[in-house]
Amino acid sequence: MGSSGFQMLGKSSALDLTVEVEARHLTDLPGIRYNGIEWGDFNADGQADLICLDGRKNLLEFLSLDTKNQKFSSVLHFRTFEKICTTKEKRVVLMSLGKGW
């Protein structure tokens, strides 16, 4: 199992100062540690999705929330481009190392 996860918290009420866990997710990708999370409706289904970043391993993972059981599931993950180098002609070349997990 991976070693990174998160919890989605919500306010319980204005009278008590507690938080309520609404959903949790622990990635099953080995060695992944999220250091950035952003949300948006990435698949145009009207529901907010999450995109999680491991900047050390240049990996993005898209998560979708099942509102019935309040669980996130991974729907897509991939490595981003890892190197930018220039050629003698000063053209920028993007390279993906394409390593496996």
Image (tube, rainbow, N blue to C red):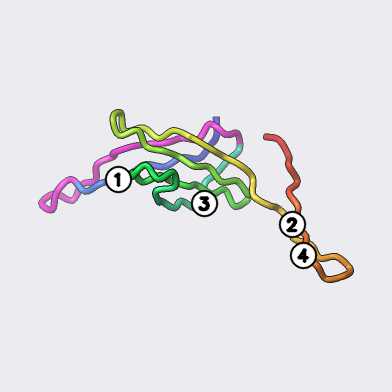
Q: Quadrant of the C terminus?
A: top right
Q: At numbered mark 4, what does the secondary structure look like: helix, strand or loop?
A: strand
Structural distance between the alpha carbons of marks 3 and 4:
27 Å
Percent of width and height locating residue 13? 14, 48
Amino acid carrying mark 4 in the image? Val
Q: Where does label 2 land, which residue?
A: 94
Residue at left 74%, top 60%? 84
Percent of width and height locating residue 15? 10, 51
Q: Which residues are magenta?
A: 12-30
Q: Quadrant of the N terminus?
A: top right
Q: Where does label 4 land, which residue?
A: 92
Sooner in the amino-acid sequence: mark 2 or mark 3: 3
Amino acid carrying mark 3 in the image? Asn
Q: How many marks?
A: 4
Residue at left 42%, top 36%? 25
Structural distance between the alpha carbons of marks 2 and 3:
23 Å
Extreme-left residue of the structure: 15
CA neighbours of label 3 inside 10 A, class few (<14), some (14 to 19), many (20+) = few
State the image quarter where residue 77 is shown: top right
Circle number at residue 9: 1
Q: Are marks 4 and 2 in contact (CB under 8 Å)?
A: yes
Residue at left 18%, top 51%? 17
Structural distance between the alpha carbons of marks 4 and 1:
43 Å
